[in-house]
Image (tube, rainbow, N blue to C red):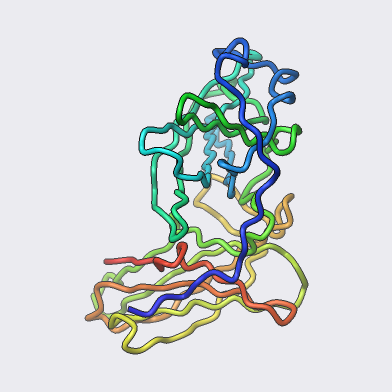
Amino acid sequence: MKKYFYLIITLFALSCSTEDDAIPNQNGLSLEKSANLKNSSPVQLVKAWNSYSFYRGFNTWTRKFTVKVANLNYDKSVSIYHEKVDGNWEEIPLSYSISLDNGDEIWEGQYRYYAYTPGKIYEDEFVVKYDVNNTTYWDNNNNNNYKIEEKQIGSFFAEPDLNVSVDSDFDRLYTSFDGVTTTLNIVADVRNISPTKEVQVVYTTDGWETERYFSLAYTKYWYNSYDYVLTSPNPFNVERWTGSVTINEEVDDIEYAVVYKVNGQQYWDNNYGQNYSISK
């Protein structure tokens, strides 16, 4: 099977570890104490997603996290340590997603909750926590903590060399009501490196015996029903690109990746060399 590999080289910050018992008040880490935690190379926030909506007094908060960790032991836990409105901090557990060719692992998770005003639980700041071999490692954005405000909608790329990211939560392969037309719809986010750029999807319906391309288009305003509107570029200088292509109605499964062409360079998101797959 043909694979497309990243042109991205991951950069990590300088490392140090902190023993669990050296961190006071584990159930409620203050902002000041969080700022003293040192960033370390075994764990790094890759990206985060934030959305907030308000409709007829009903609030919806969603925040997603993707984290990369060094596989130091099978027995481990990875979590987001998030500031709450009451001043305490709370762990949001992440789950294992995939292993990379170099042995690192991707862990992912989210929180999503609904409430009538006022119902906000979390504030803006968070750090990443990695427990393994009786040691706790932190990524706290070089002592600054990560911060995403409630109404900063869209993707935040924490990894410096991450420039394109497929939003597979919104990718679709669907057949029209009359059963005649099958459509592949792809959504991707790119870092706004230059105003002149091209974003394409490369896909196959036959296990890479053949491959085809179609282009995505810059989407200034992206609507998720009545929930929220994402404006490109967002506050983190990330743009949303979307597009679709008509597929043979007999096709049930597709494998694909996204390439971002800018300033004479190509950046790929191929799901860490495993490509993305989608089925009807």
Residue 243 as seen in the image, left or right of residue 31: left
Which of the image's four quarters has the N terminus? Answer: bottom left
Residue in the foreground of this view, choosing between 207 and 168: 207
Above or below: residue 19 compared with residue 248:
above
Q: Could one spot residue 120 in this view of the protein? A: no
Q: Position of residue 142 (x, y in %)?
A: 74, 37
Q: Position of residue 45 (x, y in %)?
A: 59, 44
Q: Quadrant of residue 223?
A: bottom right
Above or below: residue 39 compared with residue 214:
above
How many numbered marks are there? Answer: 0
User: What's the residue at 46%, 31% (across, down)?
Assistant: 132
Residue 117 as seen in the image, left or right of residue 196: left
User: What's the residue at 75%, 78% (across, down)?
Assistant: 263
Residue 271 as seen in the image, left or right of residue 230: left
Q: Quadrant of residue 261?
A: bottom right
User: What's the residue at 44%, 57% (across, down)?
Assistant: 100
Residue in the foreground of this view, choosing between 269 and 16: 16
Furthest residue in direction bottom, as rendered: 210
